Amino acid sequence: MIWLGLVFFGVAAAFSALGQGGGAFYVPLLLAWGVPFHHAATASQAVIVAVSASAMLVFHRAGFLDWKLVLMIEPATNLGAVLGGYFSQYVPGHVGKVIFAAVLAVGAFFMIRPVAERREPPKRGFAYWTRTMGGETYSVNWVATIPLMTLAGGLAGMLGVGGGLLKVPLMVLACRIPMKVAVGTSSLMVGLTALTGLLGHAAAGHFDLRLALPLAIGGFLGAQVGSRVSVRVDKRHLKRAFGVLLVVIAAWMTASVLRGV
């Protein structure tokens, strides 16, 4: 368990630098350790909550966390997450693995292929909310953003991830939020989504405190390292490397389903 905690420390450090919780790695690691899928998903979400709390402190001090944007998006996202976590008990483990592999493949695509930010002048109108954060002004189309984030929350809650693999690309591409603000804001959002997903899984009887606590401590400490590095370095090479690794993990999970493991 000690070495697994050290691995979680390293994964948390890397993913917190990208505004993500690391659930894409935690769940496969726990599955490889022999933990059943639903318990692995629940422990993963407990770790993501700890990682998010740690990274959020750093991004807030750096001025990259849009609190009002979180308040707009998260209620619907969290509803999706708690429902996804609770109703995950009706999704067979092998089906959950296939869906998880598909989400990893999508996340890998956006990590390997650079997400192009579209710089547009702020828009006005009923559907648009103008924000200023991190030295930039941008408009969020809340009519499109809320349904997209609700769907991301439902998938995150069911699969035991914080949804950062989906949220950051959606925030940049669909919502036109600057990358540095998306990464900083996502650091808090993934934790809130994971928390509500965790509550859903706990209600279904999947939570194991003895498994989750030491891993959460490792994740919290790792996120302190990763988020401090994030505000200073270019994340493009790190994203590509992890994108390739996500492809490998997705292939492994798909193969395990085909083998009936």
Image: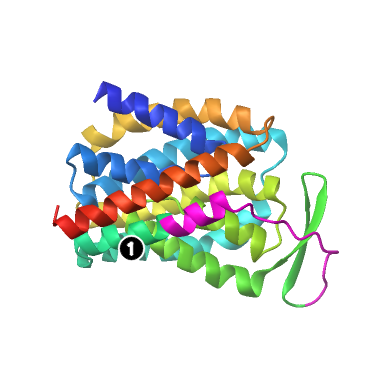
Asked if the stretch drawn in magenta spans residue 85, the answer is no
Asked if the stretch drawn in magenta spans residue 108, the answer is yes
Q: Residue furthest top?
A: 2
Compared with 13, 18 (above or below) is below
Provide residue 34's location: percent of width, then percent of height.
17, 41
Q: Residue furthest bottom?
A: 126
**Toward the viewer: 233 or 60?**
233
Instruction: Tell me which amino acid carries mark 1.
Output: Ile
Provide residue 146's location: percent of width, then percent of height.
57, 69
Q: Which residues are magenta?
A: 105-125
Q: Report the quarter where the N terminus lies.
A: top left
Compared with 63, 198 (above or below) is below
**Toward the viewer: 76 or 25?**
25
Most common secondary structure along the magenta stretch = loop
One can see residue 178 in this view: yes
Label 1 belongs to which residue?
A: 99
Q: Residues within 10 Å of mark 1 (few under 14, many from 20)?
A: some
Provide residue 128's location: percent of width, then percent of height.
75, 71
Q: Residue furthest right?
A: 121
**Toward the viewer: 118 or 184?**
118
Residue 54 vs residue 4: left or right? right
Residue 115 vs residue 130: left or right? left
- The image quadrant of residue 101 is bottom left
Query: Helix, strand, or loop for circle 1?
Result: helix
One can see residue 66 in this view: no
Residue 181 vs residue 22: left or right? right
Q: Residue at x 51, y 56 (%)?
A: 109
Provide residue 209's location: percent of width, then percent of height.
24, 37
Q: Residue at x 59, y 57 (%)?
A: 169
